[in-house]
Image (cartoon, rainbow, N blue to C red):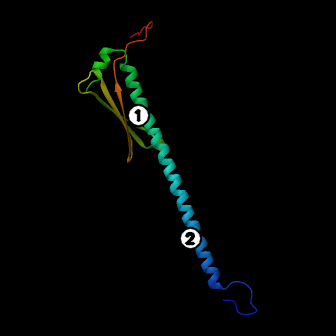
Amino acid sequence: MNRTGQLGFSLLEVLIAVSLTIGVLLATSAAVANSLRGSALAEHRITLDDDALSVLNDARAISAYDPAMFKALSGRTATMTRSGLGGASETISITVTRLAGSSNLAATATVSEGTLSISERQTLFLEAPAPGSSVSQ
């Protein structure tokens, strides 16, 4: 679109180039923002999963060598609410049920915060102390 003897770009060519550049920059920034959101969500899920596993490990430690405690846990549900990340309310619930046809128990811990919920399940079983060790109560 250059007239003979004129150098440079026309106004229309500059506007098209700027528009294309802005479009590419917007698409790139949207992709980066989406990636950061996904990363934060994954990190948050890991934190909630760690909380659920911690509750299950505590239940296992409490009941592992104590037949009375092991029996008392069966059929129980406990729920607690605490302040989570960023001041949001986090609900932790654990349910213990007897496995069908077994003396073992299944413990399920669910940790919820807002619309995000993570569940973990472990089998609890009565363990015998290691040979030569003693278990105090």
Up-down: is 85 above or below 72? below
Going 56% across and 61% down the picture, which residue do you hit? 29
Q: Amino acid at mark 2?
A: Gly
Q: Earlier in the sequence, mark 2 or mark 1?
A: 2
Report the residue marked by disc 1: 52
Report the residue marked by disc 2: 23
Secondary element at tag 1: helix
The quarter of the rendered structure image containing the N terminus is bottom right
Mark 2–mark 1 Cα distance, whole angstroms, equals 44 Å
Measured as percent of width and height from the top left, residue 124 is found at 34, 24
Disc 2 vs disc 1: Cβ atoms closer than 8 Å?
no
Neighbour tally class for label 2: few under 14, some 14-19, many 20 plus, Cα within 10 Å: few
Measured as percent of width and height from the top left, residue 119 is found at 37, 38
Going 69% across and 84% down the picture, which residue do you hit? 9
Q: Quadrant of residue 76?
A: top left
Going 60% across and 79% down the picture, which residue do you hit? 16
Measured as percent of width and height from the top left, residue 92 is found at 37, 35
Going 31% across and 19% down the picture, which residue do you hit? 70
